[in-house]
Amino acid sequence: MNSKHVIMLCGKGGVGKTTCAAATALHYATLGNRTLVISSDLTPSLRDVFEIEDSQTPVKVMDNLYLDEVSYDGVKALWDKKFGPEVYDVFSSFVDISYEAFVDFVTSILPGLRDEFMVDYIRELSESGEYDKIVWDTAPAGQTLGLLRMPAIVNEHLRTAPRIYSSVKTTRQRKRTILGVIRDWQQLSDHDMRFLRSQVDFNLVTIAEALAVRQIDGILAELSSYGLRLGHVIINQVVENPDSPFLRAKADMQQAYISELESKYQFRFTKLPLFPSEIRGAQKLEKVERRLFHDVSAT
Ligand SMILES: Nc1ncnc2c1ncn2[C@@H]1O[C@H](COP(=O)(O)OP(=O)(O)OP(=O)(O)O)[C@@H](O)[C@H]1O
Ligand SMILES: [Mg+2]
């Protein structure tokens, strides 16, 4: 069904990204694909959804299904391996530039550094060929879009970097020159952007409420400014068979937003019902999987 190697689920807080990621991963694993479900949320809940106590990473959930969480330490280690010593060397020789310029530099690069290397971490996993499918569960929308934006921003920053770094003098011996580090880093950012464009299928999880619906235009504009496109929208927690005035009122409200979405956008929409209890464990995830992938009423 999906030709891209990585399937990403994004959306605002609490809409059901992790639940949908877990059910999607279960789907591909059941079809016989060696599947990894990975979270880039630094406060992840995937383990909880699969009811896994084991803290090992990656951990085997069942045949063909593995779970991993991108930790801050893992991302930092990846950056360390690629650039750490040399960039540290550059930082530690900044005595020649003004304090303000140094602070500007550090604050502009540090939050993005973690985000860029999260993308890089998942790209490396994808390129390792270890898995047939990777399902990527993300942090709530604001942070996730920052993460997707980051390789491009870092690249932009690096374009002006040679002017600053070429005046930095150090006495230490380096394997690469500073300009060499900048060039390599730029290539890495380009590589990460190409990975996002060619290998990642973006899926939005949303709910039929005003705020969530209004956010879609912003998300689309942001994705398209980096050449990224949204493939599929899951409308979660839809009330089916309302059998009380309370549920009928809620269902009517949802239907108005669903109609608005369906008439305004050309995406493939899948409606996922509101279940009576939280979704944890294989049996409940199988129900979600059936509704996501086999429900004929879903268009
Ligand atoms: N269709 C549904 N019916 C009932 N409960 C649901 C449904 N979808 C999700 N839930 C429940 O809602 C809660 C939030 O879901 P989930 O953790 O998947 O959201 P999230 O978008 O990943 O949240 P966060 O932004 O915090 O990561 C969970 O308790 C989950 O079991
Ligand atoms: Mg989540």
Image (cartoon, grey):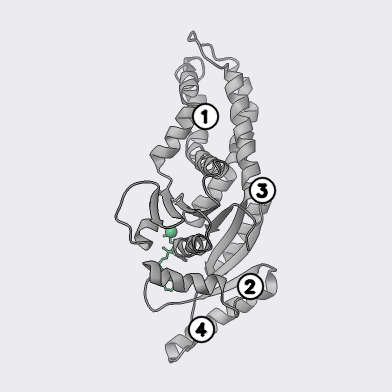
Q: Position of residue 23 (x, y in %)?
A: 47, 65
Helix or strand or loop: what does disc 4 sit on? helix
Question: Mark on residue 283?
Answer: none
Instruction: Kindly report the distance in space between the C-alpha atoms of the residues bearing marks 2 and 4.
Output: 15 Å
According to the image, label 1 marks what residue? 105
Residue nearer the viewer, 103 or 76: 76
Could you tell whether 296 is left or right of 75 in the image? Answer: right
Helix or strand or loop: what does disc 2 sit on? helix
Question: Mark on residue 261?
Answer: 2
Q: Residue at x 66, y 48 (%)?
A: 198
Q: Is mark 4 within 8 Å of ligand 1?
A: no
Q: Are marks 4 and 1 in contact (CB under 8 Å)?
A: no
Whichever of labels 4 and 1 marks the residue nearer the N terminus, that label is 1
Q: Residue at x 62, y 34 (%)?
A: 155
**Which numbered disc, 4 or 1, marks the residue closer to the eye?**
4
Mark 3 burial class by Cα count in 10 Å: few <14, some 14-19, many 20+: few
Q: Position of residue 3 (x, y in %)?
A: 65, 57
Mark 1 burial class by Cα count in 10 Å: few <14, some 14-19, many 20+: some
According to the image, label 4 marks what residue? 251
**Which numbered disc, 1 or 2, marks the residue closer to the eye?**
2
Q: Residue at x 63, y 54 (%)?
A: 4
Mark 2 burial class by Cα count in 10 Å: few <14, some 14-19, many 20+: some
According to the image, label 3 marks what residue? 198
Vertical placement of residue 215 versus 172, above or below: below
